[in-house]
Amino acid sequence: MNRNERWRLILGKEADAGLGALPDELASLDAALDAIYDEAEKPPDKGGGSRQGGLGQRGGIRLARWLGDIRSYFPSDVVAVIQQDAIERKGLTQLLFEPETLGQVTPSIELVGTLMSLKGMIPDTTKETARQVVRAVVEEIIKRMQSSLETAVRGALDRSRHAPLRSLPNLDWKKTIGANLRNYDAERRTIVPERFHFWARQHRRKEWNVIVCMDQSGSMADSVVYGAVTGAILASMPALETHVIVFDTEVADLTAQCSDPVDLLFGVQLGGGTDINRAVAYCQGLIHDPRKTIFILITDLFEGGNAAELVRRMESLAGDGVRSMVMLALSDSGVPVYDEAMAKRIRNLGTPCFGCTPGLLPEFLTGALHGADLEALAKRLVKT
């Protein structure tokens, strides 16, 4: 493909006069893009119609063909963007409401957000397909995040100290074997240890309380997806007591759904107003040991409730020793749109407010568990 052809694909059919028509082998690719991105319209003809780029009203057959076309021309990340544009620009809800077409859609974070926002409109015949799409995205996020989150939490909890309490459950096998390798008995083909090393204790009880509180307004869709999966991963760790809360003007406790992240996400209702103060008040009731509590508030801080009371509550949490952080965005871009004045007020309390990518979250958890200066950590890691 030469440069003229690339520009012609970008600019659309109106550029035919200046750049020339596309060769036949690029015509179907151009048609697939034209269906979504051709915004030109002719005046209504005598029959009252008008020409628009689109996939028409004949539903499943044309949509299925179009989905197959874009998958054959573009990599999966580009396909996901084009699909989302199809929904947002052309209102192609057939992509979500017909099992035959939804089953062919490339799963993406954005698509999960759209499914969550329209979940009440999805017909029963498509609900299971929708769950499969959401589960594919959830499993990919878990694959990316679970190991690093677990390593961060387990590494931060103090299991490095050893004690003379000699019991088999507390035996540190790795250190014991490493320290006694020089005592390997070749004839017996075994190690004869001179000294045993034991963990100070096993983490059998919930030592930390982690509260993940998420703003479910529509603008926070990507952050809610990542936040919900994060909450589910943390809830699976025996050393943590984890709560997952979502809010708009009301507050919903979704902790009981943490065993299945898909159920957790379908418990979210995107859209509506925002009462952050009310949500923080609910979360305060979940705290039983402030100095062993991590509070992760995921919101853009556009408060529709009592802003002054919200600041007072955040100040109270900081004064009590709760390790709080406000994530203005938890997304692949990590770039937030937020209430800068409110963020400044909360930062002045010593509570960091920042946007970040999911890959940075384990480092913030480690810092919180170690009692690090989270504001300084945020300044080092992010530019919010």
Image (spheres, rainbow, N blue to C red):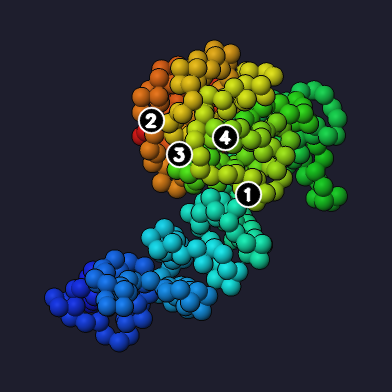
Report which residue position mark 2 lands on. 339
Determine whether label 1 and label 2 are within 8 Å by CB: no
Q: Nearer the viewer, mark 4 or mark 2?
A: 4
Spatial CA distance of label 4 from label 2 is: 18 Å
CA separation in Å, label 1 and label 2: 28 Å
Q: Amino acid at mark 1?
A: Phe
Label 1's element? Answer: helix
Q: Amino acid at mark 3?
A: Ala
Quadrant in the rendering for residue 342: top left
Q: Nearer the viewer, mark 2 or mark 3?
A: 2
Q: Sort mark 2 into few (<14), some (14-19) or many (20+) by Cα contacts within 10 Å.
A: some
* Disc 4 residue crowd, few under 14, some 14–19, many 20+, Cα 10 Å: many
Q: What separation in Å lies between label 4 and label 1 (alpha carbons)?
A: 14 Å
Amino acid under disc 2 = Asp
Disc 3 from disc 1: Cα separation: 20 Å
Callout 4, which amino acid?
Answer: Phe
Quadrant where the C terminus is found in the figure: top left
Marker disc for residue 247: 4
Circle 3 sits on which residue? 329
The residue that appears at 80% across and 37% down in the rendered structure is 193
Q: Camera-side residue: 173 or 318? A: 318
Q: Secondary structure at mark 3?
A: strand
Residue carrying label 1: 266
Q: Nearer the viewer, mark 3 or mark 4?
A: 4
Which comes sooner in the sequence, label 1 or label 2?
1
Task: Report how far apart the C-alphas of labels 3 and 4 lie in the structure.
Answer: 16 Å
Q: On the image, which quarter does residue 228 sit in?
A: top right
Percent from the top left, x then y, of residue 1?
27, 78
